[in-house]
Image: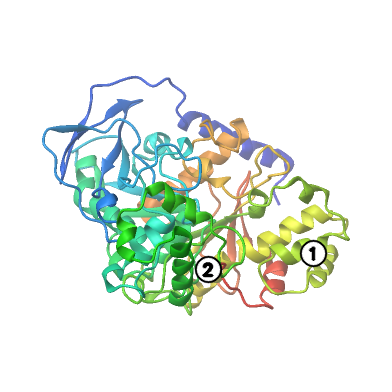
Amino acid sequence: MTTVSNRRGVLQGLAGVAALATPTAALTPKAAPIARTNAGRVEGVTADGIHAFKGIPYGADTRRTRFMPPASPKPWRGVKKVLAYGPACPQGSEEPNQSEDCLVLNVWTPALRDGGKRAVMFYIHGGAYSNGSGSAAITDGVNLCKRGNVVVVTINHRLNAFGYLSLGLLSERFADSGNTGQLDILLALKWVQENIAEFGGDPNTVMVFGQSGGGAKIATLMATPGARGLFHRATTMSGQQVTASGPLHARERTEKYLKALGITKLDDLQTIATAKLVAALATVDPIIGSGGLYFGPVLDMRVLPRHPFYPDAPAQSAAIPMMIGNTHDETRAFITDPGVYKLTWEALPERLAKNLRVDILPSLVIEQYKSWFPGIAPTDLFFLATTAGRSWRAAIIEAELRAAAGTPAFAYQLDFPCPDDHRRAQHMTDIPLAFDNTDKQGAITGNDARARAMAAVVSETFIAFAKTGNPNNRLLPAWTPYSLEKRETMLFDLPPHLENDPRGRERKLFEKVPFIQQGT
């Protein structure tokens, strides 16, 4: 057992490492760097010793290929300035700079053309399959490059109906439309294979990592034949995809969407205004029965010939080291209406029934949690149960299927809380920690000494995994992969520690009922 004095020493040591490793100097302009891609030369900027290229086209304008597989960008003459983030896919959020011409990526690197063969950390953003972009401040790649001597890539790709509207059962012309968002990601990974050596990266050492929807996209890539050889490690952060959308459910959503648009001829989809396509996304989902339309990868037997993690872990990716993580209090990010913080015991059963997403008696869940945690408040019970039953469940399924196949993953749980006690270790808390960006806009971790120390641990771990396929590093205790015997899980807190089956009672409770991924 760690003594109080030893614990204090560990924390001080971690804080010291973070202070040494995290850059605080002001950005200093450098001579403009120029790199050659297979479509033409690009000019970026150098700041704080890192070259940044933002908004590099990896695919052509998708307005010309709506609901069709992506095409390579048209080559350009001269030098294209790529100094600012490119457009995000059209979406219903407040994401700035939206356009269908959204197949762009960003690269950060310590050096160009030096044969450095640096590990490539290729990030896929969250936002389910509907929103977001690779342009958030907390996913800026400078600090990772400086800490780990790696190359960082973030991307934008087609989302929601633009990337996952399944028209294949209505017209052979659009046979791949249910997975064009995934095909965009494959095109970006092919761009990395062909161009990243120019940016000092190693095309044979590529780690894909992504949070929430980004992690789900990665789980789907693990079972996508077209992804073979394009990446070599995979890390999912609060994002799992056990099953994809069935083709009939996908067609039903498509028909509902077309009806909302007033479209009877598919050719009209090519000319209808972008704003109308976005507005129709708010149509109530016919399968879920609430919210906007769910769009995600489709089991089309073409791009995606099997479910990502059903009935087993995909053999295709058995040799790819995998790290699977979640946060301790996932649902505190999703369920935020003020009433949830004033729950009474009388109101709790009905609230659980609406939010667990599995068919289990709420009274049984309440009884179990009260026996495990004497004196627990209704609100705390609600968030523990909804996290374990709906947001954490699929991660356990994926980890157990990998272990059963003899290709175990490394499992982690982020316990480090953000400063807001209502939020704790909620969904998204690990993004600024993984990027070592606790000082950036949008970092819910805060930027005190503890947050910087935690960022040092998490970012060093991701860097180590990107380089070697093994997350062990100088800031962690020994970490062994997840086994069915012990269910080893690294708990990211200060100090970090390995624990066997940390939520075993909850796991056993929810194993009593089948898991069905919402929307599929």
Residue at image coords 31%, 53%: 271
Residue 78 is situated, as x and y percent measured from the top left of the image, at: 12, 33
Label annotation for residue 350: 1
Task: Decide which of 205, 136 is in the foreground and name it.
Answer: 136
Q: Percent position (x, y) of residue 329?
A: 67, 53
Q: Residues within 10 Å of mark 1 (few under 14, many from 20)?
A: few
Q: State whether residue 75 is above or below residue 226.
A: above
448 on left or right of 410: right
CA gap, disc 2 and disc 1 = 31 Å
Quadrant of the rendered image containing residue 510: bottom right
x and y percent of residue 471 in the render?
46, 54
- In-image side of 373 versus 281 (left or right): right
Question: In the figure, is residue 156 to the left or right of 425?
Answer: left
**Mark in front: 2 vs 1:** 1
At x 67%, y 71%, the residue is 358
Q: What element carries label 1?
A: helix
Q: In the image, which disc is placed on residue 399?
A: 2
To which quarter of the image does residue 505 belong? bottom right
> Can I make out residue 96 in this image?
yes
Disc 2 marks a residue whose amino acid type is Ala
